[in-house]
Image (cartoon, coloured by chain):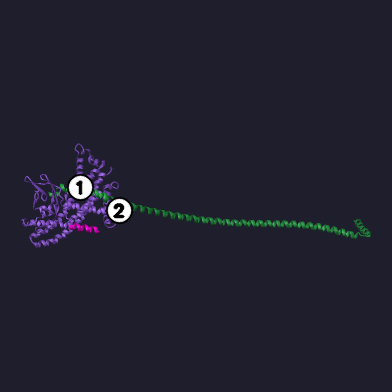
């Protein structure tokens, strides 16, 4: 029976010792240990989470880069196309303008030539008229230097009229 | 690690010095000790090894007993307070100041005194073998875990090292496998110090009980008083952390027909009994498991002496088989040491969990 009968003396020793040890261990061992463990776990969790976040950000960044590149490529293409169009337009316009200018030049040259020609012609006509008048005057002056000749010519003219 | 060696060295030095005195004193009395060869009694042999004692027995050779004397502190109704070393009893053969160790009867192995011709137990707060072993293990526990705690503050944010890395998985085991599932994520923290303390206290003492040499060899966790104190702590904590829901469950158990509660409060009585039987079972389970293990080991050892009395050769023959069985049992006991610490801690945690469970 001694084995299963609790002893008061042992009970008192054990109760006091256990209570004191529980208190001391709680204060100087379990609290710091558990806190340190918790802190470490939290820091590990934090680190993992931030690593995940970094990975996500990285992926996002990469996607962004890809998009930006795509856009740049598209833009470049558009710009090239535009430039080509512009250049061809400019060339066309220049061509057109050039032909127009050339046409205009030709036209004005032609007009000039025409007016020069007519002016020249007119001058020639006037010159010719003057010359012929002068020649005629000279001839007439020559022919009608003596009276006989005047009479002959007059006579001849008269004859011609009579014939008619 | 160096510290451990120093500690053990000092300890064994003290331990070996003290019994030397004890045995010297005994020698003087040996001659008027009319000792006839006693018949081997396995019952007494086992009981003496399992039960608490006033000295820490190391070995006996023929009539010489070598043991560490421990202080006896008694308060007698007649003669008041006494404190003396247990070596005064000369291993139970002599009386001192009217006190002696009862050799048989109700108080076998305990200090008693004769008052009016009756054997009476004085108020006995002696530092018995179990008390001293318990105190040693407590000091050991504090030393280990305070140094581990220091390592945590010193090596903040670093990976554990040495003793720290040995204890960390065990502490995490108690936290993650016992406290968290049994009590719940929200409330477990409050109970962690107690759970860790009983877990390591029980395990350490279970293991020390398996070591036959001083400072082991005391059957601390196989002592009903020790397990009773542990159970009382669990009971106190459970009762004080019981919330409204817990008490409602006991006194007005939901889901039970009303006629089981009124006019005869059958259910409340049963539930109230449960409040006390739970720690009682804790107490008995640990005590019985550890004591039984020790008993089996001692029984195998006893076999050697029983057969040895018949014929010495038979004794030698039996010893081979007995030792094999003892080795096997000790291996098993190593496992039991951990399992019982785990079970006690887990059940305590479950009771705390029940006490703090919210209504659902």
Q: Which residue is mark 1?
A: A16
The residue tagged with tag 1: helix, strand or loop? helix
Q: Which residue is mark 2?
A: B153
Question: What secondary structure is the stretch in magenta mostly built from?
Answer: helix
**Of B329 and B47, the residue lying toward us:** B47
Q: Colour of chain B?
A: purple
Residue B179 part of the magenta segment: no
Residue B2 part of the magenta segment: yes
**Of B199 and B340, the residue lying toward us:** B199
Q: How many marks?
A: 2
Q: Is residue B86 above or below residue B251?
A: below
Q: Position of residue A38 (x, y in %)?
A: 31, 51
- The residue sitting at 7% across, 60% down in the picture is B310
The magenta span reads B1-13
Q: Position of residue B331 (x, y in %)?
A: 19, 58
Q: Position of residue B7 (x, y in %)?
A: 21, 57
Q: Residue furthest top?
A: B263
Q: Colour of chain A?
A: green
- The residue sitting at 52% across, 56% down in the picture is A77
**Disc 2 versus disc 1: distance between alpha carbons?**
29 Å
User: Are the residues under marks 2 and 1 on the same chain?
Assistant: no
Circle 1 residues within 10 Å: few <14, some 14–19, many ≥20: few
Circle 2 residues within 10 Å: few <14, some 14–19, many ≥20: some
**Of B338 and B227, the residue lying toward us:** B227
Badge 2: chain ID: B
Placement of the N terminus of chain B among the 4 image quadrants? bottom left
Q: Position of residue A114 (x, y in %)?
A: 74, 57
Please identify the quarter of the rendering in which residue B167 is found: bottom left
């Amino acid at each position: 029976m001694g084995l299963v009968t609790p002893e008061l003396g042992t009970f008192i020793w054990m109760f006091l010792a256990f209570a004191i040890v529980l208190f001391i261990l709680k204060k100087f061992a379990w609290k710091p240990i558990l806190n340190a463990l918790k802190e470490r776990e939290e820091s590990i969790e934090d680190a993992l989470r931030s690593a995940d976040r970094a990975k996500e950000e990285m992926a996002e960044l990469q996607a962004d880069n890809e998009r930006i590149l795509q856009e740049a490529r598209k833009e470049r293409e558009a710009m090239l196309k535009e430039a080509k169009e512009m250049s061809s337009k400019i060339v066309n316009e220049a061509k057109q303008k050039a032909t127009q200018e050339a046409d205009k030049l030709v036209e004005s040259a032609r007009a000039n030539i025409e007016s020069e020609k007519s002016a020249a012609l007119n001058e020639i006509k006037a010159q010719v008229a003057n010359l012929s008048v002068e020649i005629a005057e000279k001839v007439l002056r020559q022919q009608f230097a003596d009276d006989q000749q005047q009479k002959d010519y007059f006579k001849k003219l008269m004859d011609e009229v009579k014939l008619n | 690690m160096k510290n451990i060696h120093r500690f053990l060295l000092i300890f064994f030095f003290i331990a070996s010095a003290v019994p030397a005195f004890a045995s010297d004193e005994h020698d003087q009395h040996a001659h008027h000790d009319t000792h006839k060869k006693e018949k081997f009694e396995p019952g007494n042999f086992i009981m003496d090894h399992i039960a608490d004692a006033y000295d820490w027995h190391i070995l006996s050779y023929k009539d010489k007993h070598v043991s560490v004397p421990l202080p006896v502190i008694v308060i007698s109704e007649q003669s008041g307070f006494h404190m003396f070393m247990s070596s005064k009893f000369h291993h139970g053969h002599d009386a001192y100041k009217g006190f002696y160790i009862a050799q048989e009867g109700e108080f076998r192995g305990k200090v008693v005194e004769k008052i009016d011709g009756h054997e009476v137990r004085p108020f006995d707060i002696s530092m018995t073998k179990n008390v001293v072993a318990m105190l040693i293990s407590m000091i050991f526990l504090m030393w280990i875990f305070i140094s581990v705690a220091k390592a945590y503050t010193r090596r903040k944010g670093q990976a554990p090292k040495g003793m720290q890395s040995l204890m960390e998985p065990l502490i995490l085991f108690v936290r993650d496998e016992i406290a968290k599932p049994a009590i719940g994520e929200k409330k477990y923290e409050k109970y962690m110090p107690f759970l860790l303390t009983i877990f390591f206290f029980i395990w350490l003492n279970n293991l020390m009980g398996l070591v036959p040499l001083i400072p082991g060899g005391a059957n601390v966790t196989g002592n009903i008083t020790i397990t009773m104190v542990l159970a009382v702590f669990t009971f106190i904590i459970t009762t004080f952390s019981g919330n409204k829901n817990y008490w409602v469950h006991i006194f007005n158990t939901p889901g039970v027909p009303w006629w089981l509660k009124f006019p005869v409060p059958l259910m409340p009585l049963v539930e109230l009994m449960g409040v006390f039987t739970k720690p009682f079972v804790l107490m008995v389970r640990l005590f019985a498991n550890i004591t039984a293990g020790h008993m089996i080991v001692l029984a195998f050892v006893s076999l050697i002496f029983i057969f040895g009395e018949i014929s010495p050769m038979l004794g030698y023959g039996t010893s081979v088989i007995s030792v094999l069985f003892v080795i096997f049992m000790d291996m098993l006991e190593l496992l039991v040491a951990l399992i019982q610490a785990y079970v006690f801690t887990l059940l305590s945690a479950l009771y705390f969990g029940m006490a703090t469970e919210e209504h659902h």
